[in-house]
Amino acid sequence: MGVNMRVLIIDANEDYKNIYSRKFEKLGNIKFDFNTSLTEEILKSLCFAKPDVILVNHYHKNVNGMEIYDLLRKWGYLGKIIITTAGKANRISRFRYNGIAGILDKSAQDDDFVKEFKSLAEL
C-alpha cells in the first residue's frame, strides 16, 4: 500500500513533472505537487501548505536551491527539505548544512531514485 505522504517539488523545468510522476508511482500512496514558479508569494504559500517533504531543484535561472531552502526555513517550514540535481549529487555536497535531509540525483534510474528518496525521507 505504501505511505500517506505529501511531497512538494520545486523545479523550474516542466519536463521533470512526468519523470517525477513515474518515479513516485513506484512508492505507492504519495501525493506530489509540482511547481515551476519561483515567485516569493507562491513559494511562501507553498511553504504554508505544510507538505511532509519538499524537493528543491538546486539549479534555477535566478536563484539556487540553497537560497530557496533558506527562504523556506525563514518562513517557518520545519519539514524535510531535499535538494535535487540532475547529475552526480556529490558535485553539490558542499551545500549540506543546517538540516537539509540530503541531496538527490533526479536523473538517477527509477529504482535508485526511489531507494535514495526512501532513505532521505526516512520511509
Image (cartoon, rainbow, N blue to C red):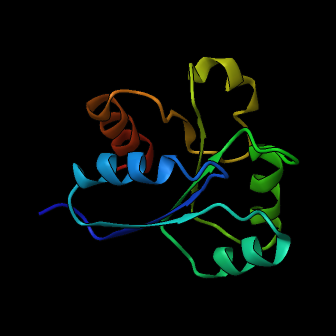
In the figure, is residue 34 to the left or right of 120?
A: right
Q: State the residue at coordinates (83%, 67%).
A: 74
Image-quadrant location for residue 92 = top right
State whether residue 50 is above or below residue 53. below
Q: Quadrant of the N terminus?
A: bottom left
Q: State the residue at coordinates (34%, 44%).
A: 118
Q: State the residue at coordinates (88%, 48%).
A: 62
Give residue 77's position: percent from left, percent from top: 68, 70
Give residue 64's position: percent from left, percent from top: 80, 43
Image-quadrant location for residue 100 = top right
State whether residue 117 is above or below residue 14. above
Give residue 47's position: percent from left, percent from top: 67, 74
Give residue 67's position: percent from left, percent from top: 84, 50
Residue farthest to the left, as pictured: 1
In the figure, is residue 53 to the left or right of 4?
A: right
State whether residue 93 is above or below residue 85. above
Residue farthest to the right, as pictured: 62
